[in-house]
Image (tube, rainbow, N blue to C red):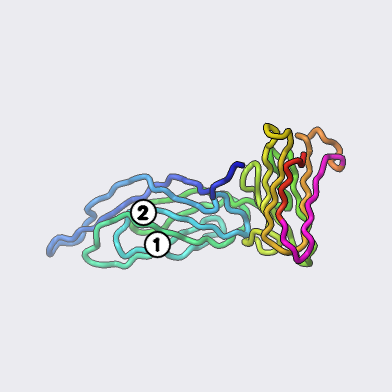
Amino acid sequence: METRACGRILVVAVALAAAIALTSGAPSAVAQQGQSPTPIYMSPASPTEGEPFLVEADLVVPGGTAAGTVDLDGQQDIILEITTIITSPEPPGSLQHFEWSVPAVAAGAYTLEISSPFVGLVRQGIAVRPRTAQLGLVGKRFQVAVADQQAGASPAAVLLSDAGGYFTLFDPGNVELTVKLVDGRPVNGQWWVFIASMTNTGFTVSVTDTQGGTCIPFSTCPTRTYTNPPDTNQNFIDVAAF
């Protein structure tokens, strides 16, 4: 069975490392300036609206610096601040690791920017995906929907890969169900369905095979349903689903 590692996106930005040196009795001056590729990571790799995400970066900066606040500028720019303790003489720059927790934002296009007097312009465009109520897996051939029996539930789907994703039921930051389709045809000629439950609320998962759009109307397409009664917790493994 294939597995999926926790995803991260590696993007390339440019950091400007500056070291300030003081000579005895002379005014300060910039001793070195250079540009080098700086890795910036996001986790999850493709954030979804309503879901906080983590940004990490390794930057060459003087000592006494730390990750600061996260600001939304005009709802389009996400500014990641770096706080600095000013000392004299300024210590030489070194590679340091920074982490920022970005709060949940609405779906749309944003510019991620690291702000510091010791770092050159670091900007990266990112996209925050909208939440949907249904997963389309394997080229959208298989449509997966969840119906929750508990009052106040609002199932929302997040696509993780072409073959899998997860659903939240109440809190957008709380994963309740994961669903994965596996092509088992080389083994037994069937598509396999895996459903992992992390809730005891009642729900029904329906998986519909549209057969690549050849199944019309949709209501006549082959469908499998998997029901978890209230106050129970069940996982489902169906190796003869379709």
- Which residue: 62% across, 61% down? 173
Contact between marks 1 and 2 (CB within 8 A): the answer is yes
Element under disc 1: strand
Mark 2 or mark 1, which is nearer the start of the sequence?
2
Left or right side of 156 for 23: left
Q: Amino acid at mark 1?
A: Ile
Q: Where residue 48 sits: x, y (%)? A: 61, 54
Callout 1: 10 Å neighbours few (<14), some, many (20+)? many
The quadrant where residue 168 appears: bottom right
Callout 2: 10 Å neighbours few (<14), some, many (20+)? many
The quadrant where residue 65 appears: bottom left
- Which residue: 50% across, 47% down? 9
Query: On screen, 216 above or below 226?
Result: above
Left or right side of 183 for 204: right
Q: Give the residues in magenta.
A: 220-234
Front-lying residue, 98 or 80: 98
Query: On screen, 183 above or below 53?
Result: above
- Which residue: 69% across, 37% down? 184
Q: Where residue 196 sits: x, y (%)? A: 67, 54
Whether the magenta-drawn stretch holds residue 229 is answered as: yes
Q: Where residue 43 sits: x, y (%)? A: 52, 53
Which one is in front in this view, the residue at disc 1 or the one at disc 2?
2
> Where is mark 2, residue-wise?
59
**Res. 82 mark:** 1
